[in-house]
Image (cartoon, rainbow, N blue to C red):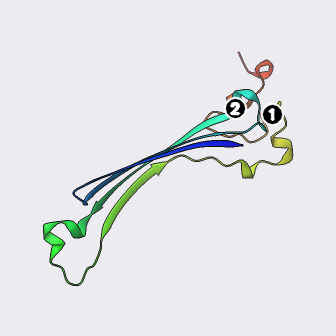
């Protein structure tokens, strides 16, 4: 199992936040055509308590709105038979496209 991970954070005036996350995971337990898979995420935030309309609000210390989206994968859900190549179409897959897990000779033309 190997992974590459990267993250970039940016903030503008300590009010507006942006984050980009990327991960590239690989394992020798899966067939070669499905061994590596990229995953990503993005997040955005707005610190409302830094805005003029809430700056003087004594009843509020910190308020931030945050929105995020990403994809993830997990090998922990594979049973022992799920990692033996070649995988059949009845077994689970990692990633976005289940056809990538099937051996070449079994794929529909």
Is 64 on the left-hand or right-hand side of 87?
Answer: left
Q: Is residue 102 left or right of residue 56?
A: right
Q: Specify which label sits upstream in the sequence, 1 or 2.
A: 2
Q: Which residue is mark 1?
A: 87
Q: Residue at x 18, y 72 (%)?
A: 54
For numbered disc 1, what is the local secondary structure?
loop
| Residue 35 position by quadrant | top right
- Residue 18 vs 106, above or below: the answer is below
Q: Give the x, y percent position of residue 39.
A: 55, 42
What label does residue 34 carry, if any? 2
Element carrying mark 2: helix
Q: Answer yes or no: do the residues labelled 1 and 2 have beta carbons within 8 Å?
A: yes
Front tag of 1 and 2: 2
Q: Is residue 57 left or right of residue 102?
A: left
Hey, which residue is sitting farthest bottom in the picture? 59
Q: Position of residue 13 (x, y in %)?
A: 21, 57
* Residue 78 in picture, x, y percent from top left: 77, 48
Which quadrant would the N terminus be assigned to in this image?
Answer: top right
Seen at 71% across and 47% down, the residue is: 75
Q: Residue 82: image x %, image y %?
A: 81, 42
Q: Give the quarter of the figure containing the C terminus.
A: top right
Left or right side of 3 for 30: right
Residue at 68% x, 40% y is 94
Q: CA distance from mark 1 to mark 2?
A: 10 Å
Residue depicted at x 13% and y 68%: 52
Q: What is the quadrant of residue 108 in the picture? A: top right
């Amino acid at each position: 199992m190997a992974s590459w991970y990267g993250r970039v954070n940016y903030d503008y005036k300590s009010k507006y936040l942006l984050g980009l996350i990327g991960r590239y995971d690989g394992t020798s337990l899966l067939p070669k055509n499905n061994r590596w898979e990229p995953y990503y995420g993005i997040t955005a935030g707005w610190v409302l308590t830094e805005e003029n309309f809430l700056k003087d609000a004594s009843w509020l210390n910190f308020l931030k709105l945050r929105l995020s989206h990403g994809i993830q994968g997990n090998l922990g859900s594979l049973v022992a038979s799920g990692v033996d190549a070649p995988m059949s179409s009845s077994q689970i897959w990692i990633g976005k496209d289940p056809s990538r897990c099937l051996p070449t000779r079994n794929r529909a033309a």
